[in-house]
Amino acid sequence: MVTTQTLPIRIEDLVAAVVDPEIPVLTIGDLGVLRDVIVAGDGAVTVTITPTYSGCPALGVIAEDIVTVLNAAGYDRVAVNTVFSPAWTTDWMSDDARHRLNEYGIAPPGPAGTDAEPVVCPQCAATETTLVSPFGSTACKALMVCSECSEPFDHFKAI
Amino acid sequence: MTYLVRLADDNVVLGQRLSEYIASAPDLEEDLAIANIGLDHIGIAQHVYTYAAEVEGAGRTEDDFAFWRTERQFTNTLLVEQPHEGFGELIARQFLFDAYQLELWEALARSSDDRLAGIAAKALKEARYHLRHTASWVVRLGDGTDESHRRMQDAIDSMWRFTGELFEADDLDRQMAAEGVGVDPTTLREAWDATVDEVLAEATLLRPDDPYQASGGRNGLHSEYLGHLLAEMQWMQRTYPKLQW
């Protein structure tokens, strides 16, 4: 979400296009990790991001990548702030991002706060799937297995 | 600042404890679960230490709090520093602590301090998820075989004496609660009791009736185990000061 309306479009897009180092099919714009970009009159850029999980190790890399991208675009003074409120939710993920996530082999999150909806297998689209472990390869994912095609897959947890 | 450091100390010490068990869990999925939960605790500690350092305004960083304080300067509760003999004790310690953290973060999410409320709201989501996982293990092992039942009961019994301290309030707690920043831990007890009783009952386990409750962690008086844990956690920074990734 970019709240400052007066920006030149390019810089917002540059920052929003930084990819998540752990799920490179998604950008920080897609995820809602990017909260704000402000360019001061003197050219200093302040970028605000929010962590997906408190212990998400990708946050440091994301901050570095933002600085690298902006430096390359000629912005030398870049500050990256972290905010916690409002707490990040998977509901901020766009439909397009969910679609790409599914194509990538990770089942996208359902609406936050509901467990009831069946998780659809990203390989064969079957709805008969079982939770193997509530904690997957990264903090934001759970490990599932499909009863139809027997393939294991990651599910992006709804929070 | 002292209040924030307490919150962070509980989390960093438990995160370090959990990391010891990675690659020793009953299965690979559980290794990942323990690593994930530990990472959440360390992340929370990092964010709270960073805030504490800003409040203090003396130029310290989160690393100074984690790596450059001695055992007596850590104010974590005794529960989180307890070693675990096996998976049952790890789960017992984690379950009893998760049930407490759930109530703590829920209360702190309403803090008048916006920054703390934000960190708490995030931590609350994680605590809920952790508790669901650890409670399911308590039930699975408690209501499992005779052997798993016996070991889960022993594990709960061995950690029980460290739970009373979680709900002790001192002047700082009361002052922070009065200012609307913090919470009086004594007010969290009732909800914790309800959660714990419900899970223990479902697990066919008995609530321990141990009148002895250990205390002292909040004042820096620790069990013998914290020093060893800190030695492991801090040796790199102390051997190579100012080391960066």
Image: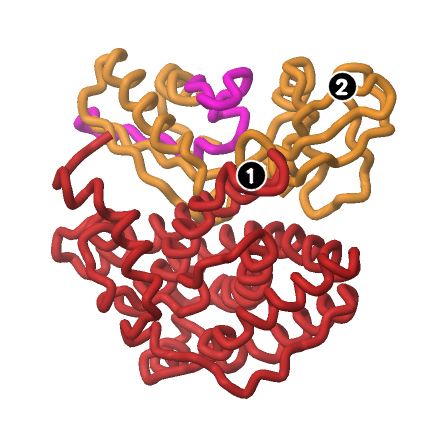
Chain colours: A orange, B red
B111 relative to B229 in the view: left or right: right
Q: Main secondary structure of the magenta part?
A: loop
Identity, as a three-letter code, of the amino acid under mark 1: Asp
Residue B203: x and y in percent read: 76, 64
Q: Are marks 1 and 2 on the same chain?
A: no
B182 relative to B5 in the view: left or right: right
Residue A117 placement: quadrant: top right
| Furthest residue in direction front, as rendered | B147
Tell whether position B42 is magenta: no
Identify the residue under disc 2. A151
Q: Secondary structure at mark 2?
A: loop
In-front residue for pair B4/A18: B4
* Magenta stretch in the rendered image: A17-43
Query: Which chain is indicated by disc 2?
Result: A
Residue B111 placement: quadrant: bottom left
Foreground: disc 1 or disc 2: 1
Residue B145 in view in this figure: yes
Identify the residue under disc 1. B31
Q: Secondary structure at mark 1?
A: helix
Tell whether position A19 is magenta: yes
Which residue is depicted at the point 51% across and 74% down? B163
Residue A58: x and y in percent read: 42, 30
Which residue is depicted at the point 24% across and 30% down? B245
Query: Which chain is indicated by disc 1?
Result: B
Residue A47: x and y in percent read: 33, 32
B137 relative to B74 in the view: left or right: right
